[in-house]
Structures are given as structure tokens and as C-alpha cells.
Amino acid sequence: MGVPVRVIQLPSNARTAAEAAKVVGCGIDPIAKSLVFRGLKTGRPVLVIASGRNRVDERKLSEFALEPVRPAEPEFVRQRTGFAIGGVPPIGHAEEIETFLDEDLMSLDEIWAAAGAPDAVFCIRSADLVAIAGGRVVRIAEKPLSGTA
């Protein structure tokens, strides 16, 4: 795709954003999580590339996807993307997948994403990720809880 990236083989698996941030040596925000959801009406996959800090608001995602969605099961993820959970990259899937990118990633110069295996990541400029992922940039994060209990 003509975009320069730096791929790193990690010394151990990094299946979560926190693990990846620790191994790469960055904060959790620039970790781009590739999360696959399943449309409840159509059964189609929907991909969210979210900042490592953020949880995806499923109600917002359902509105963007035009149908209710839920996190996909591991076998569904592998079948539809070609990758196992923990190593799903933001691009290069087994089929075309509607993609939404967390707008919080756009404020960062460089981000880190899975490179197809739980022990491999790549560094890419956020603008380049948008260009190659072909998705929509949206506000997808749940709002943090506020107030007192």
C-alpha cells in the first residue's frame, strides 16, 4: 500500500493493550486495538480500531453500523478476518470489513497496532492508518463515569 511502517517482533505475546504498551514502551493511548463485532441482524463483521484506553460504546457503534452489534466470538473473528483475537491487525483481513476508527487516535502522531500475531506489532502514523484502513473516523468511546458513588 506504499505506507512506511515499522514491524517489531515482541519477545512475548501481548494480547491486551496494556501488555502491548508495556512491551513497546509507550503509554496505552497509542495502542490501536482492532476489535471485531458481529451484526445481530446480518451476521456481518464490523471492525473498530480503538485507542488502548477506550472502551467501545456498543450503542454508538450500533448506530454507525445501522444494526445492533455485539463482540464477536473467537471463531467468528478468525473465520472472517483470518486472524486470532489478540493479533488482529487493522488491515489485511480475509474479507472486506466495515471499519470505524476511534477519533482519539487521530490526535496522536504515531500509533501501534497488531501485525497479525500476538507477538508482533507495527508502528504507523495515524493519518496513514486512516488512509489504508479505509474506515470512518468516529467518536466511539464510552464516556467515563463521573460523579460519586
Image (tube, rainbow, N blue to C red):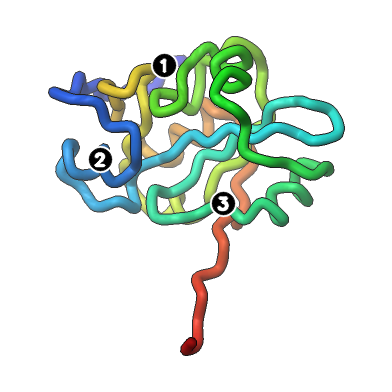
Q: CA distance from mark 1 to mark 3?
A: 30 Å
Kind of residue indicated by mark 1: Gly
Q: Residue at x 41, y 16 (%)?
A: 2
- Mark 1 crowdedness (10 Å alpha carbons): few <14, some 14-19, many ≥20: few
Q: Position of residue 84 (x, y in %)?
A: 46, 19
Identify residue for label 3: 56
Q: Position of residue 88 (x, y in %)?
A: 45, 24
Q: Nearer the viewer, residue 61 or 76?
A: 76
Residue that protrudes farthest toward the front in the picture: 149
Mark closest to the chain's N terminus, 3 or 2: 2
Kind of residue indicated by mark 2: Glu
Q: Nearer the viewer, residue 149 or 144?
A: 149
Q: How many marks?
A: 3
Determine whether, in the image, residue 95 is placed left or right of residue 49. Answer: right
Q: Nearer the viewer, mark 1 or mark 2?
A: 2
Q: CA distance from mark 1 to mark 2?
A: 29 Å
Q: Residue at x 27, y 32 (%)?
A: 14
Q: Residue at x 60, y 57 (%)?
A: 139
**Residue 19 circle label:** 2
Kind of residue indicated by mark 3: Val
**Residue 2 circle label:** 1
Q: Position of residue 129 (x, y in %)?
A: 46, 33
Residue 67 occupies quadrant:
top right
Q: CA distance from mark 3 to mark 2?
A: 19 Å
Determine whether, in the image, residue 129 is placed left or right of residue 94. Answer: left
Q: Are marks 1 and 3 in contact (CB under 8 Å)?
A: no
Mark closest to the chain's N terminus, 1 or 2: 1
**Considering the numbered disc 2 on the image, is that residue within a helix, a strand or a loop?**
helix
**Residue 134 circle label:** none
Residue 37 occupies quadrant:
top right
Q: Residue at x 52, y 26 (%)?
A: 132
